[in-house]
Amino acid sequence: MASHIFRSPLPDQEIPEIPLTAYVLRHAEAMADEPAMIDGPTGRTYTFAELSAHIHRLAGGLTAAGFGAGSTVGLVAPNVPEYAIVFHAVAVAGGTVTTINPTYGAEEVAFQLKDAGAELLVTIPDFVDTAKAAAEGTGVSRIAVIGESADGTVTPLAQLYGEAIEQVPVDVHEQVVVLPYSSGTTGLPKGVMLTHYNLVANLAQSRPVLDYGENEMALAVLPFFHIYGMQVLMNGLLAEGVGVVTMPRFDMEQALGLIQQHKVSQFFAVPPIVLGLAKHPAVDNFDLSSLRKIFCGAAPLGAELAEEAAERIGCAVVQGYGMTELSPISHATAGDDAKAGSSGITVPNTECRLVDENGEDQGVDGRGELWVRGPQVMKGYLNNPEATAATIDDDGWLHTGDVAVIDADGHTYIVDRVKELIKYKGFQVPPAELEALIVTHPAVADVAVIGVPDDEAGELPRAYVVLKPGMEATAEELQAFVAEHVATYKQIRQVVFTDDIPKSASGKILRRFLRDEAKAEQA
């Protein structure tokens, strides 16, 4: 059967072949005195002119200190305005940033620093102890801290500033500007190589869909280390001249207060936040009339919940679809063209296919795995050609691992998942990572981890555990054991003891049997 290709109903966009920071700061001169980034809790503000000046001075200092072209810099921090300064200074210096989750423990940070080949680690004072423990035995020769630190062994970031420099020349199609980590469809986290061109392309592709007006403000609560926060919020908003109010950690009442105070018009959320907007009693105590749009991503949002939140807040609640490997957006809701439960339309310059398990292409209203091709598709996984080849085929199609339906109007609905990944509150939880950890417990003989549906979190990680003969362990003991080694969102929420784990002849865990069992139990 011939392939059936779906394209965007919107015209292709011109994609400038320029470095990322030049694109992100393209309005900086015209908007020199306007606020670019505001730290929500303290009100600390950088105008567009100040942001640009800080970026280029830090870039000069990094280059002078030997952390320029060819270097990888680890960045582990919550959402603060300085995040953008460090990120773009490394980009201007011709280096690569690897963005690290600030809730990680030392083991998880060390894995990423080693794998990415980081030489400098930038963090915040509260994270210095973890950073030092994580940096041991890696290639990190220096730790710098945003702000002041009482610890004399780390360098205050301000000391790294130097003479401002212009962008170091880079090949935008080849130079990896950022290396976020994703589990892809299976296995352990892998470095996703995203070039200057990938990121600029996706910002240009998203423009007509996300459409911003003049004098808009947005609230950035979704973490910048995650591709959604990094590209759609930090880079995407600045590139459109939208002021960004940052929040280091999400708190519903503080978020509502910041929306009211700064007359925020754009709010980017994940399903648990939309649930809060629909149900939380505090919502009624704030003036949210400035909100023009709530955009939800990172995990599917139910139609009923979206409608309930939209009615209560009095603005559109729309969603999009993407993944780290797509820089990240391939689908988004354009303007007022929202359909309940839809992830929107294919963005410009992008092609899609729906391929069923027999390798047959499906047309309108057919179900199949969503394949995507376009300039936003990653260069590949770092040092992992096998995983790259398993994800991107010879014709350049990225196999997303998500099952979708596309209707006659070009709206895309994510209906299921081929891949093993668990989505807990919008974060990726790789079952393989948890299984590898749990099986090291002295009482455990075998284990399988799946996600079970949950209204608030999306999915909860559940472990099916086979104990060794004559050994004992409680669910609480196993949960505590896991909690010592991984970030909060990866923790096991449910434990089921069983006599055996269903496996194929080749020894692969048959998760769908466990998922079917969990669904039957919930029904």
Image (spheres, helix red, strand yellow):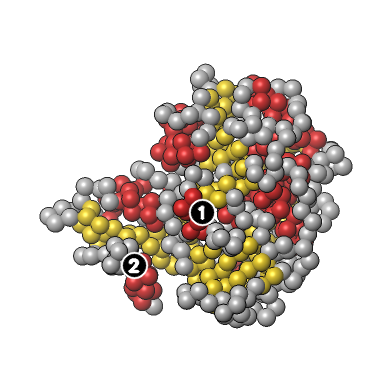
Q: Nearer the viewer, residue 282 or 426?
A: 426
Q: Nearer the viewer, residue 505 or 87?
A: 505
Identify the image quadrant of residue 204. Answer: bottom right
Residue at x-position 17% and y-position 55%:
468
First along the sequence among labels 2 and 1 = 1
Work out whether residue 47 can be spotted.
yes
Q: Is residue 215 left or right of residue 259?
A: right
At 62% from the left and 56% from the top, the residue drawn is: 377
Q: Amino acid at mark 1?
A: Thr
Residue at left 67%, top 34%?
94
Toward the top, the furthest residue is 152
The residue at the far right in this view is: 30
Image x and y of residue 317, in percent: 67, 66
Quadrant of the image containing the N terminus: bottom right
| Disc 2 element | loop
Residue depicted at x 73% and y 67%:
334
According to the image, label 2 marks what residue? Answer: 510
**Relative vertical location of residue 126 with respect to residue 361 in this rendering, above or below:** above
Q: Amino acid type of disc 2?
A: Leu
